Amino acid sequence: MIKKYIRLFKRFIVISFNQVYVFRFEFAMLLVHLLFNFSFIFIFWYTLLSIIPIFNGWQFSELALYTSIIFLGEGLGGIFFGFRDLPSKIIEGQLDKYLCRPINTLIAVLFEQVSIIYFLEQIIMSILLIILILLKYKISVSFLSILISLTVLVIGVLITNFIYGILTFLCFWVGRLEVVRELIMQLTGFKQYPLTIFPQKIQLLLTYVIPVAFVSYYPTVFLLEKQEMTLVFVFKLLIYLVIVFSVFVSVWRYGIKRYESNGG
Amino acid sequence: MIKVSCVSKTYKVPKKTYKRSLKNIIIKPYTEVYAVNNISFNIEEGEIVGFVGLNGAGKTTTIKMLSGILTPTNGEITVLGYIPYKERREYTKKISVLMGQRSILFYDIPVIESLKFYKDVYELDNNEFKDRLDYLSGKLNLSSLLHIPVRKLSLGQRMKCEIVASILHNPKVIFLDEPTLGLDIISKQEILEFFRYLNQNFKTTIFLTTHDISDIDRFCKRIIIIDKGKIIYDGDINTIKERDKFKIVEITHTNSFDANNLITCNEYNLISKEEYKSKIRVKKDKLNEFIDFVLHENDILDININTISLEDILNGIYERSEHD
Amino acid sequence: MIIKYLRIAKVEFEKTKEYFLNFIGQIIYLPMQFLLIYFLWKFVYSYNSQIGNYSFNDMIEYYLILTIVQSAIMPVGIITYEEWNDINQGNLNLYLSKPLFYPFYLCYRKIVLFLWNIIFGILFLIFANITILPWLKITLYIYNISLFILSSFLGFMIMFNLFFIVGTLTFWVENVLTLRDNVWNMIKIFSGEILPIAIFPSFIKKISVILPFQYIYYTPISVLQGKLTNEQLLDSIGFQIFWVIFMSIISLIMWKKGSVNYTSQGG
């Protein structure tokens, strides 16, 4: 069973590669695109720091690292990219072609659309960038903090994307709902800036309600050892993950039941 | 093989009310609409069955229930001993569903990559896949197309590739939903021929919906007609409405000739009358007599004898149900 | 000749409701966007009370006007996709077989959208100024507003030509969509979408002087905010006009070459 999905995963990588590679010009452009995405955030920070030299105790190198970690998280979250267009697929009845085949519908729908190559490129580039920044600014990090940071990041990516997924699945019941979903997901914009520049209440919101701080702020401070990680934190994080995941799975199950009984 | 007993499917459709109460906004009032209403039929292994109906008659709903996509509201379905919507994982390995207007191939990449994808979906090993692919692409004549991106194929070519992708796993039952939609005559012919070949050589059961009636007439032995969710005919395609007992005689005549003169007994029926042409339905055993009679009329210039077309019969059926 | 295109414009113009909903669709995201902008700049201005010649209120105002101009100009970004799609799907044949000049056709339809959104936008600004944001300092005189509309329109034309040129490239390279995304990003940096050009470090300012991008957003916003002296105002609008003419010529030449190429190969 697992073997089958590993094989399918490889197949999706090949398909994704083919999809990009048929347009050679596109292939080159994707790289440029990634470079851009990185560069203008750096320019933003560079400019801000030239205006105010100390940004709440963050230096340029640290903010660059902060940004790279966000990009890494987005790259990892790329496997959930298929959620974006799921509502229209459900409404047009496009799940049919997987429901009548021996494949997990959710996995198939998610992978069908992901440009895996693009996200792999993003993951590799952000890791390279993180290493580069660490070397260039001679920031030393311990192996343990790398491990902690990465774990928190991965869990954070899962949590935020499961929430995104839950909001997406609501369209099984109410049809087009993308505007509401995007309105809520707009909160992820807050991850661009270090948590501590916001008022206390917003900080709580970003940690516990829409936990975008888990994909940006916390992984960075743990990596830089700006903040100690506590057991309570780990505990909260895991509980959060379990709750969100179980809601995610059950909403999907009920949703697909409804699809089976009412069609697209 | 396929057993459908007393199956109904209802959809919830929002009710149109002009009252705008708070309750109506929060809990939208629904009415239930029957898409399929209490249908039953059995299909044996190796049969080719045509499933015919107008748009919205319940064809697609039925095919979706048979293939496990939709759950019936009432009644029971078993196919190959499986209950489709319950044992989906095992069941779907044994069947194939092909929807004419929905592509299952990846659009921008060569066909072969899509085929390999379905190879992994159906867990075929490499040798099996290769044999099967060689065999099918030889049979359908598309070896040269495998390395071309789907978007560059013509509709007929694409359809053949869709077929290969759908039956790589050698399914026992194939459900076809409008497989010939939009195809030209040659491609249509080739594709139907291919399915007939599968049916004859592997005893593959084929269940086909289409609204192109000429397809069904040539391709299926048995026909099920569904109208407004109910089955109104299930049986041999040649005996439908005693079709085999009559012939249509089409005569071309001079302007002055009145075809009514030919109707000398109630075994002859005038179906249509135009300035130079008339159609008369004649009971088969009276045909010789009729022709003999016609040949002696000087005003008649030409004669054609045809079987009653399925189209005419269906038209008759639908028209009658309109009046109900 | 021109009447035909005016007719297209009129048909588009009559879809008021559709355009209004469209505008609302963009405005709906504003509160959250501004919350973020507010917090960020509140924080930054807690260190400095003045950045360049922007006070805190100026800065918020900058982003507010930016949103209005964006709502009017940004929709032209879609034309690359439309062109790409029409060329690749062969729909272009349909247009070529009609007595329509395709580039004008594309442009006219977007101009209507531009006009609607800029009108809604200005009404929104006036409304906001009276009700919730009385501290806005924008002087909304007829003179001011008409200059702003003119400048925005020139910005719109620059943007249109930019994306039209990228779309026209489809004649030569099959897929241009990621190139388009890259142009988006260029615009993001150098047009003043992220930060006002004036507060950028000098090397970026130097680059943006020779590029057309700052004339898309930064110039119209500065016109309305009254940040430009009369001399600068003339200069800026002059440069806008120069870029519009220059890029239109390139667009037309490329279109001519490309479409000849296309028809000779049979689509």
Image (cartoon, rainbow, N blue to C red):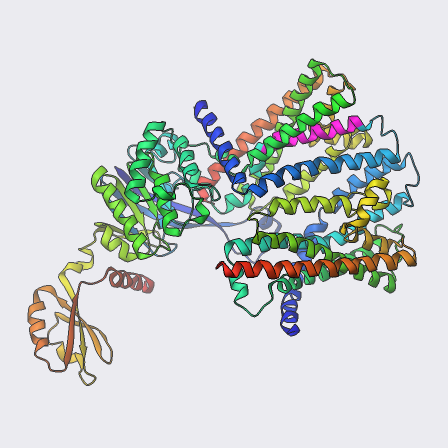
| Occupied quadrant, residue B128 | top left
Q: Nearer the viewer, residue B6 or B59?
A: B59
Work out which quarter of the rendered image holds the C terminus of chain B and state it: bottom left
Q: Nearer the viewer, residue C53 or A188?
A: C53
Q: Is residue A198 left or right of residue C54?
A: left
The mark total stands at 0
Q: Is residue B202 left or right of residue C142?
A: left
B78 over B19 or under it: above or below: above
| Occupied quadrant, residue C18 | bottom right
Q: Nearer the viewer, residue A142 or B20?
A: A142
**Main secondary structure along the magenta-highlighted residues:** helix
| Occupied quadrant, residue C75 | bottom right
B92 over C156 or under it: above or below: above
Q: Nearer the viewer, residue C59 or B284?
A: C59
Q: Residue furthest bottom?
A: B256
User: At 51% across and 62% down in the image, what residue appears?
Assistant: C93
Please tell me whether residue A58 belongs to the stretch shown in magenta.
no
User: At 10% across and 80% down in the image, what residue appears?
Assistant: B297
Percent of width and height locating residue B233: 25, 53
Please tell me whether residue A65 belongs to the stretch shown in magenta.
yes
Percent of width and height locating residue C118: 75, 59
Work out which quarter of the rendered image holds the N terminus of chain B and state it: top left
Percent of width and height locating residue C21: 67, 56
Please provide the residue range marked out in magenta. A61-78
Could you tell me if residue A99 is visible in this image?
Answer: no
Percent of width and height locating residue A105: 47, 35
Could you tell me if residue A224 is visible in this image?
Answer: yes
